[in-house]
Amino acid sequence: MRDLLCDGFQQAVSESLVRHRSILDVLSKLQEANARVSRAVAKAITTCGCLSVHAQKQCIPDHVSSYEEIRKYMDTHLEGCLCEHCRDILEEEVGSQLFYLAALCNLLDINMYDVFLKEHKQLSTLGPYSLT
């Protein structure tokens, strides 16, 4: 089912992308979509206020050595949760980001579902050692 959904989405993008079929157009639209996601998060923080950021140095005690223990001490620096309005905007912007990512995959003959499977396998196999 998941592969059909992903493949179906990728096919729908291929059929609907008419104006921006050039690789240069797709790359620039993907970059613009990435910037719009970042801007929507920033607006949720600075304009709406439903989110706030309280960032400081990540502090991991010396006695902590395992990956599972380290995870307990890592902070997202986010407080609050998205309001309905900001969530709607972010979902729209992330959708646009996915659209242009699918368009890029189409132009390069890459199947998104195969990429998901490959990444999942790598995460499952390597676990915390796959972190960058």
Image (tube, rainbow, N blue to C red):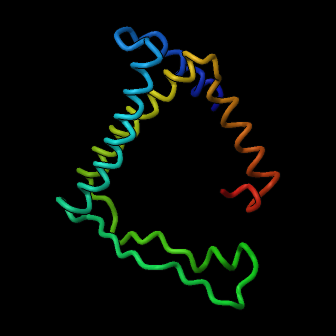
* Quarter of the image where one finds residue 42: bottom left
Residue furthest front in the image: 24
Residue furthest right in the image: 125
Question: Residue at 56% across / 75% down in the picture?
Answer: 74
* Quarter of the image where one finds residue 65: bottom right
In the figure, is residue 5 to the left or right of 117? left
Question: Residue at 28% across / 44% down in the picture?
Answer: 89
Quadrant containing the N terminus in the rendered view: top right
88 vs 83: above or below = above
Measured from the top left, where is residue 99 in percent x and y? 44, 27
* Front one among 114 and 109: 109
4 vs 49: above or below = above
* Front one among 57 and 109: 57
129 vs 116: above or below = below
In the figure, is residue 85 to the left or right of 97? left
Measured from the top left, where is residue 43 in percent x and y? 23, 54
Measured from the top left, where is residue 112 in percent x and y? 62, 28
Question: Residue at 29% across / 45% down in the picture?
Answer: 88
10 vs 15: above or below = below
Measured from the top left, where is residue 52 in percent x and y? 30, 69
Question: Residue at 38% across / 8% down in the picture?
Answer: 18
